Image (spheres, rainbow, N blue to C red):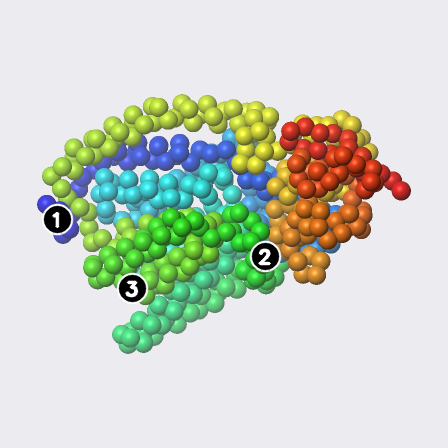
Amino acid sequence: MIDFDTKINFPPKLLTVVFFLSIFIIFLLPHFDSDFGWHYRCGAQIIQKYTICRGGEFNYFLPNYKWANPNFLYDILIYLVFNCLGFWGLTILGSLILTILVGILYFKNNITPIIKIPFVYLLTFLSWDIFKLGFRSQILSLFIAIITISFILKVDKNKTFKQLFWFPPLFLVWSNTHGGFFLGPLIFGLFVLSKIIETIKNQENLKNLKIILVIFLICVLSTLINPFGFHIYEEVYRHFQTPLNNLIAEWVPPVAIDAYLTISCYLIFIGLSLFFKKLKSFEFLIITLFLLFALMARRNLPLFYFSFGFLLLNIFPSQWKHKTEFALSIFLTVLICVALIFYAPKKFNALTLINNDFNNYCQNSYVRYPKTAVEFIKKNIPARLNKNVFNTYEWGGFLIWQLPEMNFFVDGRMPAWQGETNKSPYTTWLEIIQTKNDWDKKLELYQTDYLLISPGTFLDLLLKDMPQKFNYQELYRDEMAVIYKRNEK
């Protein structure tokens, strides 16, 4: 039988070591972030020129656009790690951060490993569509969000509210790392709301509430210590106002099965919290908020699943003790070891092929990149300095990195920007690539010199047979890319 009240001192050290080794290997992922290139260039600009990226430095469409970029610490990190250790450095760094994240879930509760290890594997599997892209600034936001929740629960349990003064420097770093920084004040604000509710309900001491309110105010002010001040909040507002769910795949709502799973997890948490009489205002508010975020965009699924996992594992009163626990621990250890024997060599072989071979990286990334077309440009267009290139959207970051002398039309920073007639630049790009709404006049207006696009697009099909009709000539074509040059009039 299962005894919830009897604590045991079963130390499955080998199982824990094997588990974390497996987690570290699972999270050794290629750096498939299509935004890597512009992050790297921004980091280089900070280190070499002592200036941060402020908008359209790398673009000829909206070149003077002002963007409150909250990523500059991440950009520096990407630049330094890549310059020192290449893609392997980014792979290892991302795995370390996600392994530490799993450690927070693993060690901050008393559940026996034979229960929480399969549970963590399940959470990882459910979040894999986002994790598989490798280390990104979004991962840092997830990491700091879980740390924030963990620390709040610990402080609230121990009633040591002055320790919350660690949050202002944490939020300061967060607000200079990723646009998800707003989650910090939001999480803390929900904690403040929960304490106000408890104070009114239970007539608790107002002194603690005053301390919490003061720290919350300092935390909000600390997020304003960044190169753009309060404008970073304008960027957050703009992201919520721009219909990114109609533009970018990662921002679309989750598919039906994921929506059902998240709602089911939410109901499971509420039900078990009520069963154990541990449903508190803060936990209820947080899990409800993250459920809404997850249902809004699939990129938020890891935030929901890992916060759900952390909160769920913390509602149980003690470890589970069962007479088969020792045998199950041995079985689970052996099972993980056997899986690693077959999985690890294949994983390292795949990583070596991608991280050590730039051609494989370009061919096997989440987005395939036009490496051969870029080499053609480098060899055959010597006078490419400050030339304007209308490019495929997904290639923007890669091209900014590989062809720093040229200016490009669009990249991954721009969907939430406000372009012509307040439209997203991504919408303008779609209209041109789909040859809509005077596409040729727009390219001429923006002084486009070259097109570097995917073959088979509407724009390519229109130009392919009679480029001279629109004042273009084809310079290059392969299965990945086609290059057109605009003729001088």
Q: Position of residue 114 (x, y in %)?
A: 23, 39
When asked about the image quadrant of residue 206, the answer is: bottom left
Q: Are marks 3 and 1 in contact (CB under 8 Å)?
A: no
**290 and 53: which is toward the camera:** 290
Q: Position of residue 381 (x, y in %)?
A: 79, 31
Which disc, if any, is residue 258? none
- The amino acid marked with disc number 3 is Lys
Which residue is labeled 3 in the image? 280
- The amino acid marked with disc number 1 is Asp
Which residue is labeled 1 in the image? 3
User: Could you tell me if residue 374 is visible in this image?
Assistant: no
Q: Residues within 10 Å of mark 2 (few under 14, many from 20)?
A: some
Q: Nearer the viewer, mark 2 or mark 1?
A: 1
Badge 1 marks a residue whose secondary structure is loop
Which residue is labeled 2 in the image? 226
Mark 2–mark 1 distance (CA, rounded to whole Å): 51 Å
Look at 71% across and 47% down and name the residue there.
435
